[in-house]
Amino acid sequence: MLARERQNAIVDEVNANGSVLVKELAEKYQVTEDSIRKDLTLLQKKGLLKKTYGGAVKVRAKMHDLYVSQRIGKNTPDKQAIAREAMKVIEKGDMVFLDSSTANIELARLLIESGKDVTVVTNMIEIMLMYTSVEHQRFLLIGGMLNDENDAFVGDYTDHQLMSFHFDKTFIGTVGVDLERNAVYTHNVQSAMTKLIVMQNSEKNYIMLETRKLNLSGNYKIASVDAFDGAFMEKEPEDWAHKQMDHYSIEWHYEHQ
C-alpha cells in the first residue's frame, strides 16, 4: 500500500470511529510506529485530524447557523423525530421549560396538538407566538433583553425571573456536544448563563440533540454532558459516537429506524 493510500485510509478510520491509536495502525498497515506518526503529522497539517498522545482524533467542526431564523425549516423531519422522543417523558401536570431551540418549536407543536395538561414556560418568541390562541394549556413567557440570534429573552432580568421557578423538566437546545471534553455548548454567553440557571432550577434536564451536532463545539460551555439526565436524538448515532456515549450515565433516547 502506498503512503497516500494509507493516509486516506487513516482519515476514513478516524472519521468513522472518532479516534485511532498509533500502535494499532502500525500493526494494521505493517509499518513502523514512526511512519504512522509522520502520517498523522501530515494529516494534521492538512486539517484532516488532530494528533493526541498515542494517536489522533476526529477534527471538531464549527458548522452551525448562529441565528434561529436561519435554522427554522432546516432538517425539520429530524427535529420532529427528536420532539416525538421528548414527548414520551412529559407527564400530566408537569411544568416544562422549552429553551430556545428549533427542535423545541416542534415539541411545542406536539404539546399543543396533544392537549396534555401541562404548564409550558419559555423565553423563545417563536414558541410564544404559537401559544397566542391556545386556551387548553397554561403558558408563561419569560421576558428580558431580546437576543436576535436565539429569538429569545436573556440577561439579568430573565435570569432573575427564572430563579423563582421549579421546573419538572427542561429541554435545552445546543449548537454542539463534545463527548471527549464532556461539554455541551452554545454560541452566546448570556444564553449559556440562562440555560444553566434553568437547569439549576429543574428536577430533570434534557438535551435536544441532532446527531450531526455530536463532536461540534461552540464558544461557551453550558454544562457538562453528565449534568443532564438524558438526550433526545432523531436516530441512532454512528459507532464512534456510541463508544464515547457509553462513558456517560445519562439516558440516550432516539427513534429506531
Image (cartoon, helix red, strand yellow):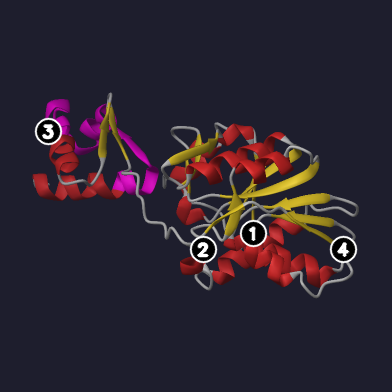
Part of the protein shown in magenta? 13-37
Q: Which of marks 1 and 4 is in front?
A: 1
Q: As shown in the figure, which amino acid type bears the numbered disc 4?
A: Lys
Q: Residues within 10 Å of mark 4 (few under 14, many from 20)?
A: some
Q: Is mark 2 on a helix, strand or loop?
A: helix
Q: Which amino acid does label 2 sit on?
A: Val
Q: Which of marks 3 and 4 is nearer the N terminus?
A: 3
Q: Is residue 229 above or below residue 65?
A: above
Residue 120 x, y percent position in the rendering: 79, 57
Residue 20 position within the rendered picture, expressed as x and y whole percent measured from the top left? 31, 36
Disc number at residue 68? 2
Q: Is residue 18 above or below residue 55?
A: below
Query: What is the C-alpha distance between the residues marked 1 and 2?
Result: 10 Å
Q: Which residue bears the numbered disc 3?
A: 38
**Element under label 1?**
loop
Residue 116, labelled with which disc?
Answer: 4
